[in-house]
Amino acid sequence: MRVTPGMTADNALYYLQQGRLGLDQVQEKIASGNNINRPSDDPITTRQLLDLSSQIRSWEQFGDNIKSGNIWLNVTNTALTAIRAMISQAKSIAGSISSGSSDATLRNSVISQLRGLKSQLVDLGNTQLGDRYIFAGFKNSIPPFVTGSDPDPLSATFTPVQFVGDNQSPVIEVGEGLTASIATAGGELLSGSSGGTDVLAVFDRLIQAISANDATAINTEAKGLDAAATQVDDAISRVAGKLLLLKNAEEVNTGNINTLKNVIGDRQNVDYAMAATVLSQQQTAFQAALSTTAKISQLSLLDYLK
């Protein structure tokens, strides 16, 4: 096979283009800081990087869920703490008149205080976070506690407060295969669902007992306030446990995200020291190729006739 000057020129041009391409690729990596700037640079590693990025997005979503759950539980804890304080105040008020009193003015004053505390309990039971009611279960778009047309327990037409939410607990995903309940059932908390103490009913009966100046009934309902306090304390403890679960999940979540980002960094981030060495080698090789090509292109037929 005869090698013609045209073939020599084509080969020289091809290797120059390859050298220029290699040089450009190294310069692009240094400029972008990425080993891979397009899928064609390394299809296999590109696939791996996409999978890792997808995993990071999943864990970041878990992180967002955890943040939302923490907000929900902290609002719940604040409301529960306030409810516990209301019950303690009611207990103190009941204790001040546990033996009854012939002073109607005193009894009316105590009744007025208890009515106010009950009204605050209902308001706390209807605590909102944004447009959602935290004690309403899945029916959290409407207030879970509805005051009757006549909420006065001393009235002949008295209508007790009704719980219209549900006692189911919404859950959130906080990790792969891991969910957490964030809700506290309002019916179980204040209305005695599932066999618990009907806190609001205890207030109603206590008001009626004080109005009737019935010392025995006053002391009985005061004990009901003790049961109510224990019920709320249990709810506060459960919220604390849920917050701890979210804290642990958040630590795992953060660790997984950092690990995945480190793996991506190891594969994607440019080693500038190595890249600089490769760039120098590529530049030297390219300059040598240019020099050689220039010498070849200067040859003519007269050169071969010497």
Image: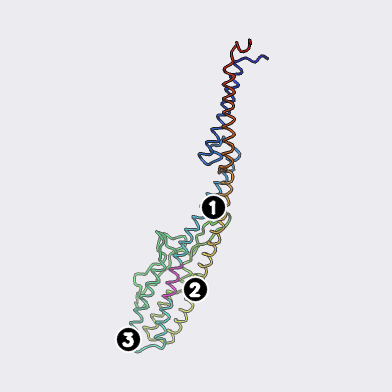
Residue 134 left/right relative to 7: left
| Marks 2 and 1 close (CB-CB < 8 Å) | no
Instruction: Give the CA separation, mark 2 to mark 1.
Output: 33 Å
Q: Is residue 154 above or below residue 243?
A: below
Q: Which residue is mark 3?
A: 104
- Give how far across and how far down residue 169 sits, in percent: 50, 62
Which region of the structure is painted magenta? Answer: 77-86
At numbered mark 2, what does the secondary structure look like: helix, strand or loop?
helix
Place of residue 90 in the rendered image (x, y in percent of width and height, measured from the top left): 41, 79
- Local crowd size for mark 1, using a 10 Å CA cut-off: few (<14), some (14–19), many (≥20): many
Q: Is residue 200 placed above or below 177 in the rendered structure?
A: below
**Kind of residue indicated by mark 1:** Trp
Label 3 element class = helix
Residue corresponding to mark 2: 233
The residue labelled by disc 1 is 59
- Queried whether the magenta region covers residue 293, the answer comes back as no
**Closer to viewer: mark 2 or mark 3:** 2
Q: Is residue 180 left or right of residue 162?
A: right
**Depth check: 40 or 158 in front?**
40
